[in-house]
Image (cartoon, rainbow, N blue to C red):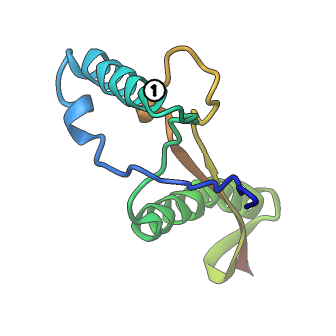
């Protein structure tokens, strides 16, 4: 009889909100990680992570895209000033990139789930009118 080694992957997902609401949060999160590692060791398993993400990326991405468009407005106004023109509207907005960054290095000694960030790059084309 040939014995095959079978690998099983399990993912534990939970909200990190309780760990961010108090000063004891980071310590409680560390204790949870220690408990998971202890359970894995008892079962002869390997643990990777933690890996941080948000539950629903859509609303966060929408918000940062809006912020990127708002931040581009001052550059449009500056261009209008240089061209001796008036910025009269937005012609188009192209989303160039939406990037999620976080503290997902599994070797990090003190992971911080509050470090998950979303950044957007946009190209805004404005309509100008000569003064």
Classify the position of the N terminus by image quarter: bottom right
Image quarter hosting the C terminus: bottom right
Give 68 or 77, whichever is nearer the viewer: 68
Which element carries disc 1, helix, strand or loop? loop
Task: Estimate the x, y position of residue 61 in percent, counting from the top left.
Answer: 51, 64
Point 38% across, 60% down: residue: 55
Q: Is residue 109 left or right of residue 85?
A: left
Picture coordinates of residue 127 (x, y %)?
70, 81
Q: Which residue is mark 1?
A: 112
In the foreground, 120 or 13: 13
Q: Mark 1 packing: few (<14 Cα in 10 Å), some, or many (20+)?
A: some
For residue 69, side relative to residue 92 (left or right): left
Q: Is residue 22 left or right of residue 125?
A: left
Residue situated in front as seen by the camera: 68 or 48: 48
Image spot of residue 89 (x, y percent): 60, 80
Q: Is residue 95 above or below residue 118?
A: below
């Amino acid at each position: 009889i040939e014995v095959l080694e079978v690998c099983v992957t399990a993912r534990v997902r939970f909200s990190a909100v309780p760990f961010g609401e108090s000063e004891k949060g980071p310590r409680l999160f560390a204790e949870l990680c220690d408990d998971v590692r202890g359970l894995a060791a008892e079962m002869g398993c390997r643990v990777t992570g933690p890996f941080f993400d948000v539950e629903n990326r859509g609303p966060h991405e929408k918000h940062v895209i809006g912020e990127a468009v708002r931040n581009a407005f001052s550059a449009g106004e500056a261009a209008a000033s240089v061209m001796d023109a008036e910025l009269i509207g937005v012609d188009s907005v192209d989303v160039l990139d939406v990037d999620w960054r976080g503290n997902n290095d599994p070797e990090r000694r003190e992971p911080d789930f509050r470090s998950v960030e979303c950044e957007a790059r946009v190209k805004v084309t404005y309509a100008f009118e000569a003064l």
